[in-house]
Image: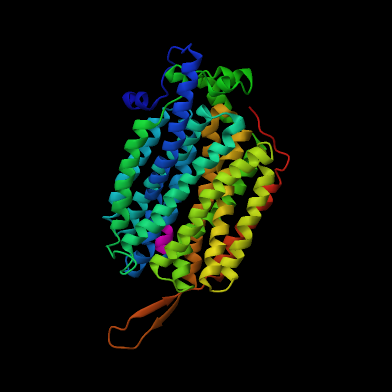
Amino acid sequence: MKSVLKFFAAGPDAPRITDVAEVDRLFHLHRRNIIFILVLGYGLGYVCRLAFNVVKKPIMDAGIFTPEEAGFIGSMLLYGYAAGKFSNGFLADYSNVKRFLAAGILVSALLNFGMSLSTVVGLSAALWVLNGWFQGFGAPAAVVAMAHWFSNSERGRYYGIWSTAHAIGEGLTYLGIAFLIAAPPKGLGLDWQWGFWTPATICIIAALLLYRLLQDRPQTLGLPSVSEWKNEGSAGMRAGTFDAARIWKDQLRVLAIPSIWVIALASSSMYVTRYAINSWGNVYLQEIRGFDLFDANLFIFLNTAAGILGCVAFGYMSDKWFNARRPPANLIFALIELVPLIVIFYGPNNSIVLASALVVYGFGLSGLLASLGGLFAIDIAPKRVAGAAMGFIGIFSYFGAGMQDYISGKLIYDSEIRVVFAIGENSPTVYFYDYTTPIIFWVGASAVSMLLAASLWRAKARD
């Protein structure tokens, strides 16, 4: 155990490099590499989190799991992720982030291989809750890396760029994995197990890339802190020394900041809607709107692709237009997200209208995801404990997402209408579901999130 802890511990400070030109060169080199590998590695690692969502419909159609059982299994990942993001958020502040992040994604890959072998509810739920916990290594470690390598005045832009990673992962999952599973001519028609095998292989590659290219704190390379290099922040932040006792005290301070609690509740409500679309959107489009599996996942991909622009736009807008203030941008993006939701669920059954609404929704949601999902809290919390702030927001966010998945599955299952076609002795049964109640639940959650975030209009960032 001591060897394991030593392997994951933050590295010691190296002798300081005194050549100013060399310091500048190394900062520019590593910052470019770090933001690139964080986006690519975290994005590729994301597919191991979403695999079950794509194969949910084929698994239900095969009679392996009912909608209620599928919702239960899906919620287990979110509960595991909530606990993992919280606990690992605190651990990430003390860790060597390259090893921490790579290890989490590698174990997630192994658990996806395990899911391909299971048709038992209890075993699948156990594997998926563990997958959620190890996926919880990712965001806190990435945020700690950004806090170490990017300063306050530029963090919104870089956080926005990093937040595109989830859109990359969702795009690969909802388009690429769906293509493998969908029936010809729009897909390859492979067995549902390929929906786990392929993400697992991708995540192994992602773990190797992260271990090779990500870096620990600048001080472990003989560089000053980024605050000192940028000449920003307080004297304590510019010093950038690693003090475990001070980190623990600052982590406890996070729990005593009222604004952090409000952000956590706003994020939790926003995640209800986000994961409703991720988990049930493709099923809704197939059962209510009449699309096949590939087209339904293509529509979900459109909202994901738009999210890439949304993340970047939010970071740039909040940094440049509002002087790194998040609340005005939060309100704008909340309205951009809420209006198309109403069109998606209550508008006409027209492909162009639905596609346009999903694009606008994805743009607005991803901006909120960047802010309420972590950036806003990191602004308010002490910067040396960015992982703890991210973890605290995460446990609320994914508890809300997990409750959504189970509640949505339960509401859909309770609306079940069974129609038996009297063709012969073994007459097939067709299942129809009413989405009226879950839709009210999903849209209402977005409205609540917008109001909670707006209540923090005067919240200010700190060093």
With 178 as the anchor, is 257 left or right in this view?
right
Relative to 14, is 210 above or below? Answer: below
User: Residue 223: image x %, image y %?
Assistant: 48, 18
Is 22 positioned to the left or the right of 208 in the image? Answer: right
Q: Say which of 201 and 314 sits in front.
A: 314
- Residue 254 is one of the magenta-drawn residues: no
Is residue 71 within the magenta segment? yes
Q: Residue at x 33, y 40 (%)?
A: 106
Query: For the point 50% across and 28% down, which residue is it?
Result: 149
Q: Is residue 32 visible?
A: yes
Residue 337 pos. (x, y %):
60, 56
For image coordinates 44% across by 37% down, the residue present is: 36
**Position of 28 compared to 122: left or right?**
right
The relative height of residue 351 versus residue 93 in the rendered view (above or below) is: below
| Main SS, magenta residues | helix
**The N terminus, quarter of image:** top left
Find residue 328 and report its horizontal and vertical position in percent.
69, 45
- Res. 6 image quadrant: top left
Magenta residues span 68-73
Q: Nearer the viewer, residue 151 or 388?
A: 151
